[in-house]
Amino acid sequence: EGEAIAWHLLESTEMDPEITRRVVFHEITDHAVSDAFANPREIDMNLVDAQQARRVLDRLVGYQISPLLWRKVRGRLSAGRVQSVALRLIVEREREIDNFVPVEYWTIAAEFRPDGIEDTFIAKLARIDGEEPVLGSESEVHPILEDMETASYTVSKVKRGERKRKPAAPFTTSTLQQDASRRLRFTARKTMSIAQQLYEGVDLGNGGELGLITYMRTDSTNVSESAQNEARDFISGNYGQDFLPAEPPKYKTKSQRAQEAHEAIRPTSVLRRPKDIKEFLDRNQYRLYQLIWKRFVASQMAAAVYDTISVEVTGKTDVHSYLLRASASTLRFPGFLTVYEEAKGIDQAENGNGDAKIPLDLAAQQILELLRLIPEQHFTQPPPRYSEASLVRELEENGIGRPSTYAPI
């Protein structure tokens, strides 16, 4: 869009393209603006043509379908190459929900006490006679429970290991909107409005306004070398060398059609900590700035490290053999989690039993006492309706729309 505006300006004022240059910057700070004017460039006609093509597509869709909607449905409705696809996604999801038929299924877990150990642990039934259990009703579960009560159980396998969890990339437009929706309950439009204020600048008491974040309409996870170096110095100085990865991390964008014209959304300086400038920001500005600051600092930090343990339990009766499994993890080194952890939405719930407890001195061939069996009835669930956050993610994953269109759509 910006490139097309520049070209239109050049054309309408009849400037000489040989001596006319375009200046581009992504943050409103002294350094960025000065550097941009020191390195002007020619207008990129490929970008201008891309904007013109997008405009033609808008008209091919909107100009033909909108009048049809006015005649057949009701006035003032409109169609477009992005909004019509977004509407279709919502309609298709609603049809899935309407047509969904719940299916009953059961799971069985067991609580064990290892021989000579006070602590107990819970394992889930994974196999019956080597096959995955299919338990569709209480009547199918009952004979299995009766048989499992009579089984003798031993630990057949214990595996200990390590798992590393890497930080999330710095924010793009879509991930900022998603995280602000989940954490702060902001709509996409509200997020972009507040981000615009932080980008345009705030008076921090020094006279004049200073841009606090980089440009907020972006699909790129790239970060400038100077920003990375500043972040690394900040992390080593405030958290210690252990929290600093050996090499500055590089992130790949998940967007199918990322144009990466801008950097990721980040603070213009990590040295402006949220708590230091809180008095100059209103509540919503502070909350969003803090979210952006934490996400960026965490993205430059070392991975979190977990100790993991997984256990297999074998149970045998005259009729069946049973395999039960349990796993747990313990945080050994917090790494980036000291600063920030990515929020999960209802449609992004994590699987697993990370909070489960398994006695650390458990060993293979250990005899187990069965304390109780835990049968649970479940029903399959329809897919959830889209939230603003999950719809934005769906649009991005399908290459629909651009960072500038998510909020209005």
Image (cartoon, rainbow, N blue to C red):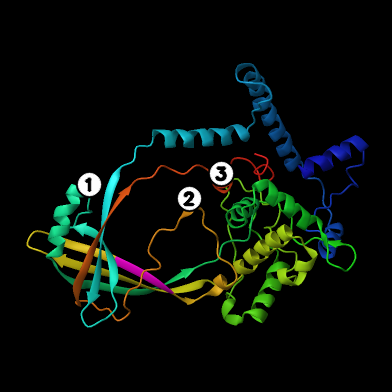
The residue indicated by pointer 1 is 137
Residue 291 in the image, given as x and y percentages of width and height: 65, 62
Comparing 123 with 168, the one in front is 123
The residue indicated by pointer 3 is 391
Dot 1 lies on which element?
A: loop
For residue 25, side relative to residue 107 (left or right): right
Disc on the earlier residue, 3 or 2:
2
For residue 277, say whether it is visible: yes
Q: Main secondary structure of the magenta part?
A: strand
Residue at (65, 54) in percent of width and height: 220
The residue indicated by pointer 2 is 347
Residue 15 in the image, given as x and y percentages of width and height: 92, 41
Q: Name the amino acid, label 1.
A: Ser
Instruction: Give the residue at the far top of this rendering.
Output: 71
Start-end of magenta stretch: 326-330
Quadrant of the snapshot with the N terminus: top right
Label 3–label 2 contact, CB within 8 A? no
Spatial distance from mark 1 to mark 2, Cα to Cα?
27 Å
Comparing 383 with 255, the one in front is 383
Q: Is residue 392 magenta?
A: no
Q: Name the amino acid, label 3.
A: Leu
